[in-house]
Amino acid sequence: MSNWISLGQSCVPLGGLTLPVLLPPIPSASRKEMDFEAITNYSKLHAKPPGVFLQYGTAGFRTKAENLDHTMFCMGLLAVLRSKQTKATIGVMVTASHNPEEDNGVKLIDPLGEMLAPTWEDHATRLVNAEERELQHVLTDICKKEDVTLQQEAFIVIGRDTRPSSKKLSQSVTDGISVLGGQYHDYGLVTTPQLHYMVRCRNTDGIYGTATVQGYYEKLSNAFVELTKETNHQSRSRTALKIDCANGIGALKLKEMEPYLPKYFVMHRYNVGSKGKLNHLCGADFVKVHQKFPVGLEMKPGERCCSFDGDADRIVYFCEDAAECLCLLDGDKIATLISTFLKELLDKAGQTLTLAVIQTAYANGSSTRYLKETVKVPVHCVKTGVKHLHHKAQEFDIGVYFEANGHGTVVFSKAAEEKIRNQAKEEKDPQKREAAKMLENTIDLINQAVGDAISDMLVVEAILALKDFTIQEWDALYVDLPNRQLKVKVADRRVIDTTDAERRAVTPPGLQERIDRLTKQFQLARAFVRPSGTEDVVRVYAEANTQENADRLAHEVSLAVYHLAGGVGEPPTTEVR
Ligand code: 16G
Ligand code: MG
């Protein structure tokens, strides 16, 4: 952990600037025992809101910002315990991604930049919901169950998005860290994937990269320049890219990165936060779910555009077609482009590494068919949520994973990476060596820790440039089946239990049979329902041969959910948009 030394000014023992003078300063030295008196005193300053139960969901805790102060403090405490247990740097990111501006959230990042281990998610839920008198017991119990050595030092890195509430909430995290004697470095405003990158850099002694935003920009831009250096700079795919930044952190970070990018990559940023509200009528989630153009972006037919989400870990591409309609290139299209590119390079290099694509139930049926039948790569379907995709992808030498919503990346096994890097150095055959070098640059351009809008955007731009593809040519690889997503409010969404990677409902009784009957009435149809992991709703997905049929099927399925799973409020109307 040599990187603990270079903490500079930002590692201060007390993060919360709001602490009252009455309390003694928290000693910064690592302690042998937990100081429960101090914990209790500081916990009172971050009092648990009465009657609020929060669950560490798909991507951490998420709710109205005003209810999160206590949760943040607890996540500071938990991050210290996780750091002591793993003997590694742990990340705490304050963000609610694509949620509205009033919300906020927090998630912990594990040592290699991956999502928090599931057993610790349970500890997080327990700790956050514990009453003040139970805190001591819960903390002691976690230490016992997880064999935490209290003498071990702890180091945490923190980051936050641009929400107005994020700064204060991240200070509550630092209070939690400090009261348990942990040390920290606050990166301030960063994208979620940048913080994941920092964690991975710090825990690999810098082998993955330099743990600074500058190190991140240098790594990605160097790889991009190398990968695209042979491309024709006048090519059709070199026209400016228009980026909808969702009024979020992506706007700031792209601006910082611009000087590192070669002149021939021209980007125009929109929804940069100067006027509109975060994620409001813009951003990747809005464009994908509503299948509508974001506001605030001037475009002409055929121009290449993309949208980030609020914390810049998702990206979708789009353009306006000849009929002035939205033509969406979502995570499935990105996965197809990347996996085709990797497969071609592997073939050229003569490498026999296993390559697979991981999707979720939301993947468009056409994409799955195209990947299996045309690209000829194995495709696996797992439950929604990055952790499930990431985990499955690690079973292969090269695992490409993408959710249709635009969150995804590629993971390379250590052995695959070594083979590729060795071949790039030692291969005698010039063509094979060139292919290996391109694979090597692709590895460096990809943020393997987690899906990353900036990194994914550069990968897509590089591939389009190398193939001299316009966005329309890329889109024409396969035609998406029309689809529709809806949500239904129910009294308790936990009444819905699913199986087969969320493609079938096990409960409530009769629901799946109803969905099966409805699906049979349409051509090329598929539908499923699942309880959301981030919102108090049940999600409905349907696809079919025409948009009208997809809309009808989605509506019929929502009605089935409403009637069989305890719908509340008015029944879903036929108005789907
Ligand atoms: C979170 C997940 C995303 C998933 C989405 C589903 C992470 C980092 N993010 O945003 O992968 O697609 O939740 O939301 O895991 P839902 O459960 O509300 O549909
Ligand atoms: Mg996000």
Image (spheres, grey):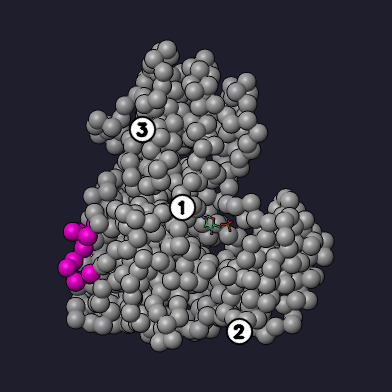
Give the quarter the ligand 1 occupies. Answer: bottom right
Q: In the visual, does 22 lie left or right of 368? A: left
Q: Amino acid at mark 1?
A: Ser
Q: Which residues are magenta?
A: 257-266
298 or 557, which lies in front? 298
Mark 1 or 2 closer to N-term?
A: 1
Mark on residue 184? 3
* Pointer 2 residue Cβ closer than 8 Å to ligand 1: no
| Residue type at the position of mark 2 | Thr
Residue 66: where, in percent of width, then height? 51, 37
Q: Write the residue at 48% across / 71% down.
A: 292
Q: CA distance from mark 1 to mark 2?
A: 31 Å
Residue appearing at x 23%, y 69% in the figure: 266
Confirm whether the magenta stretch covers residue 265: yes
Disc on res. 546: 2
Q: CA distance from mark 2 to mark 3?
A: 53 Å
**Residue that carries the numbered disc 1 in the rendered image:** 97
Q: Is the CB–ligand 2 distance for label 1 below 8 Å?
A: yes
Percent x, y for residue 218? Answer: 22, 55
Residue 416 visible = no
Dot 3: element? strand
Q: Quadrant of residue 452?
A: bottom left
Of the image marks 2 and 3, the number of the one nearer the N terminus: 3
Q: Looking at the picture, which amino acid does disc 3 mark?
A: Tyr
Q: Residue furthest right?
A: 509
Q: Residue at point 79% right, 62% down? A: 563
